Amino acid sequence: MAINLATADVEPRERRLKAVLTYQGSANDLNERSKTQSLKTTTRPFQQCSDCSEMCASTLSECIRGAAIVTHSPIGCAATSAGDGPLDVVTKARGVESQRTQVICSNIEERDTIYGALEKLRGAIEEAYRRFSPSVIFVQSSCAAAIIGDDIESLTDEMTEELGIPVAAVFCEGFKSRIWTTGFDAVFHAILRKVVKPPRQRQGDLVNIFNFLGGDTFTPLLGKMGLRVNYLVPLADVDTISHMSEAACSAHICETLAGYIATGLEQQYGVPEVKAAAPFGIRWTDEWLREIARHTGREDVVEDVIATEHARIEPELERVKKKLKGTRVYIFAGDSYAHSLTNMALDLGLEPVGVTTLHHDQRTDGDLDSLNTLGHLVAARGDIENFTVCNRQPYQMVKTLRRLKPDLLIVRHMHMTILGTKLGIPTVLEGDVNVSAGYDGVIKLGDRLYQALQTKRLIQNIADHVEWPYSDWWLEEEDDVYRKEGHRA
Amino acid sequence: MNGLIGQPRYSCTLAAQQTVLAIPKGIPITHAGPGCSSKVFGFAAYGAGFQGEGYAGGGNVPSTNTTEQDVVFGGERKLRDLVTSSMQILNGDLFVILSGCTSGIIGDDVKRIAGEFAAEGFPVVGIESPGFSGNSYHGHELVVDEIIRQYVGPVEPKVRPRVVNVFSVVPYQDAYWRADLEEIKRLLEAIGLEVNILFGYGSGGVSEWRDIPNAAFNLVLSPWVGLGVAETLQELYGTPYLHCPIFPVGAQATSRFLREVAQFAGIPHAEVEAVVAKEEKRFYDYFISLANFISDMQNSIPHELLVVADSLYALGTSDFLVKELGLTLEGLHIIDNPPKNRIPVIEQAARGLGGEFSEALEFHIDGWEIQRHMEEKVGKPGQTVILGSTWESDLAKRTDSILVHLSLPINDDIVVNRSFFGYNGGLRLIEEIYAGIFRKGRISTLTQVQEA
C-alpha cells in the first residue's frame, strides 16, 4: 500500500500496519497469523500507563540541528524536553559539533480550551523564529489542541509563507493512536511533505541511515566499501535532511523506526530502501551489506569485506560466547528491534527463554516480506515458545518474568529495566543501539551482557528489599493478563 | 511573553500524581492520555535527580490511556472498570483518580465516579486535574485539598494539644522533599510536638491523614503553597494555622523558626531554648571548623549569588547565604508561577528579609527569559554561585560559576537524602558550595588560580 502524503496527518499504525498491542503465544504462530492480519488488540479492563506518539515525535524532532519545536500543548506535554547536558554527550559520541534543543511550549491554559489557542500558537511560532533563527519549525499538536479543534495545518501553511522557512505541523496527539511509534511516522510524514526536496543529483556513495542519537559506528562498517553515511534525522541539519532524496539507498537501525520514511523516499524520489533486516547479528549484517552493495555498485568488494570481517571477529566471538555459555535471556523491546536483539542473543549462544515486543505490526510499509524481521527470525532460528506483545504493563510482565526466571534481561525502553532489577535479574538497557550494529556490535553486546551478570550482588540486594504493589491474589492467578472483573480485594 | 514557556521548570496539574505517590501506599489512577503519567514520571521523579518509581509509581500507575473512541463516546465506563481492577491488582490504602486534558475537555465526571466507590466504602477520591488547569504546584495543592475534603471528610475533631500537621515542600517538584520532611519532623519533635508529616518515608500514611482534623494547629512552612489547604482546614475543622513563609536554612533562620512555632504552640520557653542551644552549638562547631579553609581561600570563594528556584527554596537558601555566608544577592528568579493573589505574600516575605531581597525578586515562567537576565547579571569568572537546575549548566560552565541544584529539572545529578533545611541543611549547602570550588579545578592546596 502506498504512503499517502496528501493528508496533513499520518494514518495511525493500527490502521496502516494493522499493529496490535496484545498477543500471547509463540513467535511462529504470531508470524503465521500476521500473514492474514487476523489479530486484533484486546481491550482490557486493567491497564497501566502507556507512552504516547508525542514522545516519539519529540525524540526525533527536538534533536534536528537548527530546528525549533513549538509544542502546542499544556506545559505537561512539553516538560520533558531534553536538557543541554545530554546533547553534549551524544554529539561527542557522534563526533559532531555541540548543539542544543530549541523548544517553546504555547502553554495551552483553561481559557484557551474555550476560545481556542491559535493566536497563542502564532505568537509561539513567531517567538521561536525570533529566538532561535531556525531553518525549520516543527509544530507538534497535542490531545488538548486536537480536541478544542485548532486548525494547525492552515496556520503553519500561512506561517511558512510569512517566515520563508518550512513551518511543518506534526500530528502526534496521544489519543489518536494506541501505538506510540505512530509518533515517528508523524514526524517523518511532516518531513516528507514539508522539508525534503527533489534530488539535485544522485550521490552514488551516500547511504541514508535512519537512527536515533547513537554513536558513529556505521562509518567504520560502510567505509570498508568506500561508502559515506548520512545519519538521519537527529543531529542532522536541515540542509542534510532536505537532500536525503539524493542518497543511493536508505537503511535504518530498526524497521519500526524508519519503515515509513524509507518507503516514502522510495515512492516519491526513487531512493531504494535496503530490503534486508537491519544489521544486528552476523548473518543479518552479511545480508544487509550485500543489499547495500547491490544498490551502490559494490558487489565486487562486498564478499571480501564479509569474509575479512568474519575472520577478524571470530576469536572475539568465541571468547564472548564462552563467557555467556548456558545463560538464559529474556528480551523486552521493539517491535522490530526485539527481533534484532533475539537474533544477536542467538549469535552469542544465549538461550532466549522468551520475548516481548511493545507492539506488533502485522505488515510493513510497502508490504515487504524482506523487511519482516519476525519472519526472518523464525525462518532462520526456529520458533520461540514464549512470545508476547505487551505495551509495558509491569503487572503482566512481572508474572511472566517470575515464571520464566531468566538469568538476564535485555530491555529497550525507558523505565522498564526496573522490572528485572526488582526481581533480581541482571538487566541491560539497550540505549544507543548503534553500538550493537554490525560485526563488532555483537561482541560489544556480549561484553555488556557479561558485565551485567557481574552486578548480580547489587541487583539481588535491591530485589531482597523490594515491596511489590501487586496483591497476592494477582501474583498467584495463573493468567498473566487480567481479562475480566473477578476477585474484589 | 504571552504565557509562552521555554526551558520548562515545572509540569502540569497532573504532576500531582507524584503527590499521591508521596503518601505511603497512595495509588494514583490517571484518567488521561496514554503518555501523561509516563511524562510526569520522566520530569518530576526521574528528572528530580533520578528518583525512581518507588512502591507503585513509574510504569505501575494505572491509566485509562485515552483513545479516539473515548474522546467520541466518553470514558466513564472504562474508568469504572479500571478503578475496580486497580483495587484488586494493587495493594493500596488510598486510590486517587486524576483526570487529564482529554477527560477535562470531553467532560467525564471523575468526582461522581469516585463518590460511587466511596459510598461503597472504598478509599477512592476523584479529582479534576486536567493539565491545562495549572502547574505542578497548583496540582499539589488541589490534590491535598481534595483528599482532605473527600477522604478525611466532615468529622468531629478530637483535638490533641501539641499535634501539628505540616504543609511545606511539594513532593518531587522540590527534589529534596524526602530529607526535608524527615528533618522538619525531627526538629519539631525535638521541641515537643507530635507531627503529621503526611508524605515520605517518615509518614504513617493514611492514618496520619485521618488524624488531620485532630491537630492543635496547622503549620504552613512555605510562602504560599499550602495556604489554601490551611484555609480549608480552618473552615472544615476550625483548626488555626501558623504561616511561616521563610523555609529556614542555617542557624539563624532555623532558631527563629523553632521559637516562632514554639510560641504559637504554647511550648514553654525553656524547652525550645534548650533545643536551640544544642543545635546551634553543633552547627557552629562544624562551621568554625571551616574557618581555616575560609581564611586561606578567601579570594577563591565565590561571593555573588544568582538563584533560580521556587519561592520556597529561593527565599530560604538566599536568606542563609546572604546573611550567614556573606554572599551578595544578584538575582532571585522565582519559577513557581504563583496565583496573582499570592504574589503579595511572596513580595512581603522578601521585603521582610531586607531590601536587597525585594530588589532582586523577579517572577518568570519562561526559562529563556531567566537565562537572558542571568547572562547580564553574572559576574567575573569564578565569582558566582548559581542555585538552579540542569538548564543552568551551560551558563555555569561558560562563566566558571558553581552550580548547586535547587530546582527542576535535575537530569545530571543524584538526589538521595540531601536536604538544605534547618541546621543540617545549612551545613550541607556550605559543603556543596565550598567543595564546588575544587570540582571546578580552580584551586588546590598548592595553588589558587586568580584572574589576571
Image: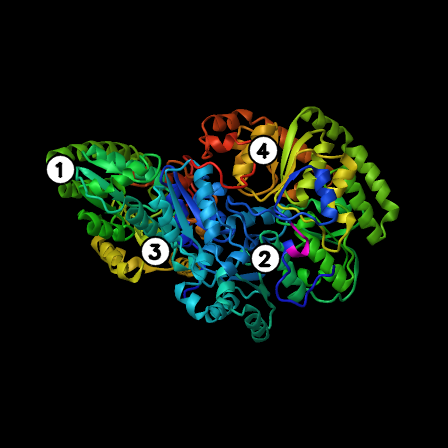
Circle 2 sits in a helix, a strand or a loop, which is it?
A: helix
Most common SS among magenta residues: loop
Residue B386 in sight in this render: no
- Label 3 crowding class (10 Å Cα cut-off): few <14, some 14-19, many 20+? many
Compute the Cα span from label 2 to label 4: 35 Å
Image coords of residue B50 (percent x, y)? 46, 41
Circle 1 or circle 4, nearest the eye: 4
Identify the residue at image location x=80%, y=35%.
Answer: A310
Which chain is mark 4 on?
Answer: A
Residue named by callout 2: A61
For label 1, the SS is loop
Q: Which residue is mark 1?
A: B267
Task: Name the image quarter holding the N terminus of chain A.
Answer: bottom right
Q: Secondary structure at mark 3?
A: strand
Name the element at disc 4: helix
Q: Quadrant of residue A403?
A: top right
Q: Which mark is residue B334?
A: 3
Using the image as rendered, state which of residue A462 and residue B107 is in the foreground.
B107
Indicate the position of residue A208 as horizontal and vertical percent values: 72, 54
Q: Amino acid at mark 4?
A: Thr
N-terminal label among 2 and 4: 2
Q: Chain of mark 2?
A: A
- Could you classify mark 2 by the number of other residues whose Cα lies within 10 Å: few (under 14), some (14-19), or many (20 or more)? many
In the image, taking residue A135 as reference, residue B125 lies left or right, namely: left
Q: Are marks 2 and 3 in contact (CB under 8 Å)?
A: no
Q: Is residue B130 left or right of residue A60?
A: left
